[in-house]
Image (cartoon, helix red, strand yellow):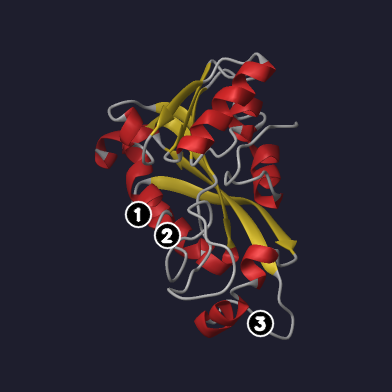
Amino acid sequence: MRVRRLPGVYPPSDDSYALLGALRERARGAEVLEVCAGTGLLALAAARTAASVTAVDRDRRAVASIRINAALSGRRITVRRGDLFAPVAGASFDLIIANPPYMPTPAVRPGPRSVAWDAGWDGRAVLDRISAGVARHLRPGGCLLLVQSAFADADRTATALTESGLDVTAVLERPVPLGPVSDHRIDHLVDLGVCDPTAPIDRLVVLEGRLAASERERAR
């Protein structure tokens, strides 16, 4: 699927397409929320078969890009600007999709900066907030699909989601070569102990977290 994006908006990449493959059947007939939506690629794909789709991003250019892509595709998407779940406070969904910033980021480094991928010293700044808040916005039996780099510790995300009341499964793991963003900060990744300098490679992980019917009240 081809999408338009304004300058500075995260372009669909390997992580986007890894998540795209996982969401297809899960979106059918569902009420769907995408957070950290970027261009809205995943929201657009979900809108083919979903009952409804809401896309959220805090960046004005991303919100404009989603609206442009929705109009060009003729798909109905509710677009909200704001931080993660704040624009949908009190609402719940059958499926939540997230491709958040997850790249470990030193305070001082060469290379480009962007809120689309910079995620604090260990890459956990947004992942931990999603893990803590997502269960409150899932319906009983609903699920989260989240993609991240192994550099930001996917096992830690799985543990945090489990502690929030979700049953967690890694539905996809895929090695990928380092891209320009990770290549600029390889020294930091090596210092963190998450990257082997002799064989630098990243690994994308797609996690599914499903909320059991009995867990919804515990998540409140």
- Helix, strand or loop under label 2: helix
Q: Which of disc 3 and disc 2 is earlier in sequence? A: 2
Q: Identity of the amino acid at label 3?
A: Asp
Q: Amino acid at mark 1?
A: Glu
* Label at residue 196: 3
Quadrant of the snapshot with the N terminus? top right
Q: Is residue 76 above or below residue 134?
A: above
Q: Residue at x 53, y 21 (%)?
A: 30
Name the residue nearer the viewer: 78 or 49: 78
Q: Are marks 1 and 2 in contact (CB under 8 Å)?
A: yes
The residue mark sitting in front, 3 or 1, is: 3
Q: Which residue in the structure is indicated by mark 1?
A: 163
Amino acid at the residue labelled 2: Thr
Q: 164 or 180, which lies in front?
A: 180
The circle drawn on residue 205 is none
> In which quadrant of the rendered image does the C terminus lie?
top left
Question: Disc 2 to disc 3, how far (Cα)?
Answer: 24 Å
**Residue 66 relative to residue 86: left or right:** right
| Residue 87 image point, x, y percent | 34, 31
Kindly indicate whether the residue at mark 3 contacts the one at mark 2 (C-beta within 8 angstroms).
no
Tag shown at residue 159: 2
Percent of width and height locating residue 64: 53, 29
